[in-house]
Image (spheres, rainbow, N blue to C red):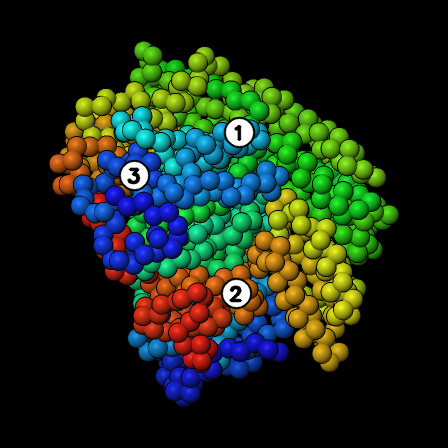
Amino acid sequence: MSLVMPAPDPATLAKRAEIVAALRAIVPGEGVIDDIESLRAYESDGLTAYRQPPMVCVLPETVEQVAAILRWCHGNRVKVVPRGAGTSLSGGALPLADGVLLGMARFNRVLDIDYADRVAVVQPGVTNLAITCAVEDAGFYYAPDPSSQIACTIGGNVAENSGGVHCLKYGLTTNNVLGVELVTMEGDVIRLGGRGLEPAGLDLLGVIVGSEGLLGVVTEVTVRILPRPQTAQALLIGFPSVESAGQCVADVIAAGIIPAGMEMMDRAAVHAAEDFVHAGYPLDVEALLIVELDGPVAECGHLSGEVERIALANGAVSVRASVDEAERIAFWAGRKAAFPAAGRLSPDYYCMDGTIPRRRLPHVLNRMNELSGQYGLGVINVFHAGDGNLHPLILYDANQPGQLEAAEAFGADILRLCVEVGGVLTGEHGVGVEKRDLMPVMFSEADLAQQQRVKCAFDPELLLNPGKVFPELHRCAELGRMHIHRGEVPFPDLPRF
Amino acid sequence: MLRPASIGDLCEVIAAGEKLRLRGGGTKDTVGAPCEAQVVDMRSFAGVIDYDPPELVLTVGAGTPLAEIEALVAGEGQMLAFDPFDHARMLGSEGAATIGGIIAAGVAGPARLSRGGVRDHLLGFTAVSGRGEKFVAGAKVVKNVTGYDLPKLMAGSWGRLAALTEVTLKVLPAPRTRRTLIRRGLDAAQAVAAMAYALGTAAEVTAAAHLPDWQGGAVTAIRLDGFTESIAARAAMLPEFEPAEDADALWTAVRDAAPLPLDRPLWRLIVAPGKAPGVISALPHAAWLFDWAGGLIWLATNADPAVIRTAAEAAGGHAMIFRADAAMRAAVPTLHPQPPALAALEARVRRAFDPNGVFETGRF
Ligand SMILES: Cc1cc2nc3c(=O)[nH]c(=O)nc-3n(C[C@H](O)[C@H](O)[C@H](O)COP(=O)(O)OP(=O)(O)OC[C@H]3O[C@@H](n4cnc5c(N)ncnc54)[C@H](O)[C@@H]3O)c2cc1C
């Protein structure tokens, strides 16, 4: 494993008993966990290749407790890692050996629902799906729907700017959050945004969303809720080539149609999913598209006809439109089961998350197949086709020596390829520890320094979630003095952390 | 006035350390306190750099005129979905707005209600910071979470962080048809309730506004945009509303706050929509209209700024001076003052881009 985390500070480790006592004084009872066995439960998130039990875990219940914890940790130079449900796929919630893990699970209440203003105010530990559950009787829902929605928290969604299969039409988390209450590392409680559409000053909320727990701890979230569309219909379309499927996607958009969801699966993914859930997918295709249309019945009927026409014009070999809700769900079942289906093909799999300009899809898939041969590891592809967000699943066996390292190297090559064709390292899963060291592939030193200066504005001592996102942690004072010429840093030999 | 022709020139101009006021078309020169800074004309950074309609992505120089971009995307059946517009009419200014100025001022019209603002459509940019350093942020694809979302900070930053030279925007297909429905004679509270009701149905309302005095009476308007096939079905979900004549004029009037008198200061209030009627009753002599279903209030009034700001805060929002004479703009902060902890944090974020205060001209 190549990942280097900031070296634990021996002085902090030596003060463990004192730190535990200080946290107990703030959060009484069961809210402070310090026995080694129980801490194991927190040693990793959804990126299970990396494990590190925290020094101690604290589970506050009130914003005052969060502020007191952060103030104390700031005063005593103790690092803090926030955690929601621990489903991050990029290691964002990976604990530190000398850090406090701040679990937000007890912040689990829906505080207010206002149907007239179409907002819900919730605590950050509320799960994504629970927001929809809280408003669905009134005919509303919360649009961003990561596949992990039953488990992941809205606080984690805010930190990762999570997406889902419907974000082409309805946006990512950032487009659906109107306000947050945030506690800074210094213990200040700040409100950003609210129920209005724009802030009074700089859009700091915009930079909090997607900040991966590095800028502050979110203690309340105001989200926009939407009325449920009258109906939804899915089309299942098989293509003889990836090129024709890709062209169909482009033509649908060129026809002015933004479907609620537009997912692609390659041949390997179709077979894996069909073997697993028997969704009725055609097996003699190179690519399968699921196109979902939602809205008034009249609109869905019209648009599904249009999409079918475009698909046939692009050589689709099979087109089926769902006739009822049960069939629509069945069409999705295979796509939604892509992860567990990969799990049946191989003991372990590694999910990547780059985005590319869609027109480069055939090239990228061909290169990926070449790399697959080179590394001797299989790969299956599911893909948010509308927005170009790829999810290659690399198949490996962690018990075979060298395979994890090979999978990681393969994954890194895929992400470099994404950047090379004009895309990005991550479309929705975040940088975390996973893509941290690849950041220079996409950003120059000057670009990264500018981002890190924003970090310094929120957390000058770099105590909140250090070791994530940035490949090097420059001290803030040093960064202030640093001038970058032609992308070269003045002190290339400084230790990384 | 300086007019740098290249990023290298711009870096030098900024690194020189003089106070600088960034300007595109100059249409919003009268927003903010009068100030003494050197003006930097950004219009050399103009032109289309990349546009691939099916990718839904457009990259242009920040000094490109808005009208040019709108014509370009309209030619492909697309639009800038945040509904930008030129403030020249509203502010009585000369010149033509540039996309950089639109972004810096966070300009979004009636459709912002449903389609999002500048913040939701700015995907990436190249800029020169107050340190005189070129940097890029965001990307040129529609879905990206790599690194901090600095484009969000640039939207509505009023030139206080960095000089934008190149911007990448998300574009979307333009609707084929629009239909406007209205109700007449509602008061502020009834209008807000009617708009909230419509937005809570599956009719997919694009825009919702209320004019207390439009062609002789109060009009509450709802716009439905989309495919012809669906609009009739959506209109049928709102039987209380009737079809409107001459709706384009109405939406332009809403966007430009045109019905409001020109002889007094114009304020822009952003509030929780449900609280909008309360703001109006706290300011009985003001002329006003509601956009964004009540979430945006345009207010023309000589009322005491403190009273206006208190009313905005009570409604969960804030108030900005949009048009006023120089004396008032010199005396009253244009942007709504923030609570101390937030103001301090915001100042630190500004220093992160502009440590020497090159862009801190006193305008805001
Ligand atoms: C099976 C599976 C499917 C998935 N599908 C999707 C998908 O479709 N789309 C998608 O975008 N993601 C997906 N994910 C990734 C993951 O679910 C999301 O990133 C999710 O938002 C993480 O939420 P969490 O509550 O688990 O956060 P955690 O994993 O606990 O934490 C994630 C990050 O958020 C920070 N954080 C958590 N809470 C707070 C808070 N209150 N304040 C500040 N920082 C905080 C943490 O420090 C960490 O950096 C999937 C994951 C799995 C395991």
Distance in Å between CA atoms under marks 2 and 1: 36 Å
Q: Which chain letter matches label 1? A: B
* Residue that appears at 55% across and 47% down: B142
Q: Which residue is mark 2?
A: A439
Say which of A179 and B245 sits in front: B245
Residue A343 position (above or below residue A41): above
Ligand 1 rendered quadrant? bottom right
Q: Is residue B135 visible?
A: yes
Which chain does the numbered disc 3 sit on? B
Numbered mark located on residue A10 in the image: none
Asked if the residue under mark 3 is in contact with the one under mark 2, i.e. CB atoms within 8 Å, the reply is: no
Which residue is tagged 1?
A: B74
Quarter of the image holding residue B97?
A: top left
- Residue under disc 2 on the same chain as residue under disc 1: no
| Residue identified by numbered label 3 | B315
Labels 2, 3: one chain: no
Characterize the local packing of mark 1: few (<14), some (14-19) or many (20 or more) Cα atoms within 10 angstroms: some
In the image, A98: left or right of A434?
left
